[in-house]
Amino acid sequence: MSRHVVCPAAELPPGARKVVVVDGREIGVFNVEGRLHALLNRCPHGGAAICSGVVTGLSQSSGPGDYRLERRGEFLRCPWHGWEFDMATGQSWCDPRRTRVRSFEVKLEAGSDLVMGPYVAERYQVTVEDAYIVVDL
Amino acid sequence: MKMPFAGAIDCDLHPPMPSMAQLLPYVDDYWRDQITNRAIDRMSFAMMSYPPNAPISARADWRAPNTARSDLDTLRAHVLDAFDLRFGIANVMHGAIALHNDDMAAAICRAVNDWLRAEWLDREPRLCGSILVSPQDPAQAVAEIERLASDPRFVQVLLPVMGEKLLGRREFFPLYEAAERHGLVIAVHAGSTYRYAPTIVGWPSYQFEDYVAQAQAFANQTISLVAEGVFRRFPRLKVVMLESGVSWLPMTVWRTDKTWRGARPEVPWVDRWPSEIIREHLRLSVQPFDAADATAVAQTLDRIGSDEMLLFSTDYPHWQFDGDDVLPDGLPPDSLRKILIDNALATYPRLAQGAAAGAVELAREDVR
């Protein structure tokens, strides 16, 4: 396991996403209302760049004609075929056991902690004053 | 394949279609006046899907009239005794369901049901019946279900596969509510009221095309029932497809599952795999089984992934098999008991009750 600084926190405010390349892998990093998610940018179904898909909630119902959108911001819908994935786990909602997008640990870390440890800053000069987004591979 | 043992349950057999003259005693004075004075009693009301003289509509050796015995004795000899059946469910797909006059349709459906009860069910304890209703008027259809539901010999409600609307639509929910509440199955039988062309791209020229196209209608109805959430709303409801063929099912189920994964938010009440819902709630009769040979039959069953969806039927007197080869070759030997008996008992609560009580006879006494 290796830890990678992917960007300063200021580059990923709530509502933002960016696709970064870490160790040759494309990874989408999302800030959904302060919650951070990191997912491999590849849908397990057809290989689409899934991290360009819509971030949305889960349509739920108690029966015909009843519609509710729940868990807003927790699901990523693939742009090709509309399959829905739980961003926290990478699991497909329809088929959670067999179909999942690879997901990674992602955290906000203070620069003062980062300069001390064995971290890899992909493209950034880490300074003590800032906070950074760090992905575990 | 011949019948391997006695006691099977035939989920689709057809008594001869009653003539209007036979039904007249079962309509009230108003409708008797209308039917006779408008010469409606001269019409056969045969469904166009089943031209009486088409070879498929009746096997040659079952067609020959035998004036020495009654229609009931003929049915006993050809089916009930010939295959040593325990129960047979009699389905009368009368052309009244194609009438645009909702009230006349309902009156004739009532007559057909009362005729079936008096002329067949009262005289032969092995026979059970279907409640024929005209689905285009759901309120009258529900009233007819309520009228007959207290008679345990009626085990299902009979609808044509091609009526005016897809069967998942909410206007039919009162029918399903009544059926579920009374422990009745919804039976969907081949046949069209010809409100629309029987192919989705227009009118065919030949009965040959019409016959082949029926399978598409069964696939459409299956998808509609799932997509509209009928089984979410009525979790104890079973739908039996009669004379549907079988080979369309695995392909339809696969496409429905696959599409659901992406289209799910549009129908959020479909909250689990359509294949699971279909396996739980849908049943198909085995005559005709549209597969080429024993290998194809076995493969089809394997692709369905369950031997609990198939119900035995003869489809008497339609010409689906010769001699006494009443079952398609290729059904797994271990599944025969399920297909011939157990699946029907699990599908039809009223048959199970009848079987548990030892006889439908007993229940009949309560109704009188």
Image: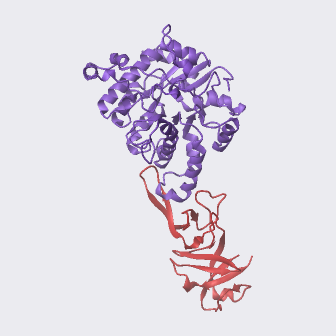
Chain colours: A red, B purple
| Quarter of the image where one finds residue A19 | bottom right
State the count of labels. Answer: 0
Q: What residue do we see at 66% from left, 78% from top?
A: A135
Q: Nearer the viewer, residue B233 or B104?
A: B104
Q: What residue do we see at 68% from left, 41% from top?
A: B299
**In the orientation shown, which residue stands out farthest toward the front?**
B205
| Quarter of the image where one finds residue B260 | bottom right
Residue B233 percent across, percent down from the top left: 46, 44
Residue B345 percent across, percent down from the top left: 58, 28
Is residue B358 visible in this depiction of the protein? no
Q: What residue do we see at 52% from left, 12% from top?
A: B73
| Location of residue B351 with respect to B214 vertically, above or below | above
Q: Nearer the viewer, residue B220 or A77?
A: B220
Q: Along the horizontal axis of the image, is B292 left or right of B104?
A: right
Q: Nearer the viewer, residue B65 or A109?
A: B65
Q: What residue do we see at 38% from left, 24% from top?
A: B44
**Rendered-image quadrant of the C terminus of chain A:** bottom right
| Location of residue B142 with respect to B75 vertically, above or below | below
Q: Nearer the viewer, residue A11 or B88?
A: B88
**Rendered-image quadrant of the N terminus of chain A:** bottom right
Residue B113 percent across, percent down from the top left: 40, 23
| Location of residue A102 with respect to A133 vertically, above or below | above
Residue B200 percent across, percent down from the top left: 45, 47
Is residue A67 visible in this depiction of the protein? yes
